[in-house]
Amino acid sequence: MYRIFLKHILDFILSLSGFIILLPLFILIVLFLLITNNGKPFFFQRRPGKNAKIFKVIKFKTMNDKKDIHGNLLPDSERLTPIGNFIRKTSLDEIPQLINVIKGDMSLVGPRPLLIEYLSLYNTEQKRRHEVRPGITGWAQVNGRNAISWPEKFQLDVWYVDHISFALDVKILYVTVLKVFKSEGITSQNSVSMERFEGNK
């Protein structure tokens, strides 16, 4: 009952309420990013959702678009702006994804939506992460986020798929809030963001 029906209803009610409450902060961040990112406060990217259906995820844009002399984007660490760094450390960049949840593309809790090009790299077990809607936070996020390896992340994602419950979602949301305040697991050891998944080797 919860997985099929109640989870989606709660997602809509909680995300809509949260967005209304956070609207003043949302507008303030947009204004700051309009100035620091040359009028581009949002980052849009196509990601696979439930059953690998493609949708556009929306986040606050934390990196600029500076390129090297060859026209290639500079490394993440060089493009991360000071305000972007603060927004990312406090996980405020995730706020716009409440819109994705309201639209039904995402859930508050579920496996994080990854890049489309990863779809062909998953093994049969890893593909099961797409049996549910992707989430703003998830079991992998509260157990290491970007600080754990890809195999560990996928194992945790599939474990969540098999154990979805109201109590588990409440636990994940609670631990997420604690980790946001502590800024735990925001980055991997060698990069501003998680290293790319290169497949199962």
Image (spheres, helix red, strand yellow):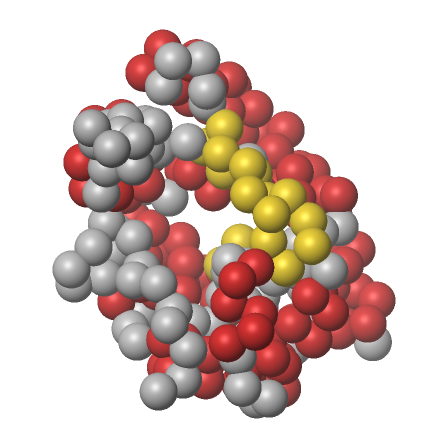
Measured as percent of width and height from the top left, residue 85 is found at: 25, 35
Along the viewing direction, whichever of 120 and 194 lies nearer the viewer: 120
- Is 178 displayed left or right of 131 in the figure? left
Asked where in the image residue 191 lies, by quadrant, the reply is bottom left
- Which residue appears at 16% of the width and 63% of the height? 189
Inspect this view and state whether residue 61 appears: yes
Q: How many marks?
A: 0
Q: Give the residue drawn at x 23%, y 37%.
A: 74
Q: Position of 108 compared to 199: left or right?
A: right
- The answer to whether residue 95 is visible is no
- The quadrant holding residue 6 is bottom right
Q: Quick check: 13 above or below 70?
A: below
Q: Is residue 62 left or right of residue 183?
A: right
Q: Position of residue 160 (x, y in %)?
A: 56, 79
Picture residue at 46% right of the left edge, 20% below the top: 40
Q: Residue 156 placed where, x, y %?
A: 46, 80
Camera-nearest residue between 126 and 152: 126
Instruction: Give the camera-side residue of 64 and 23.
Output: 64
Quadrant where the image shows the C terminus? bottom left
Residue at 25% of width from left, 67% of height from top? 147
Residue 176 pos. (x, y %): 41, 58
Q: Quadrant of the N terminus?
A: bottom right
Image side of residue 85 versus residue 100, left or right: left
Identify whether 62 is placed above or below 105.
Answer: above
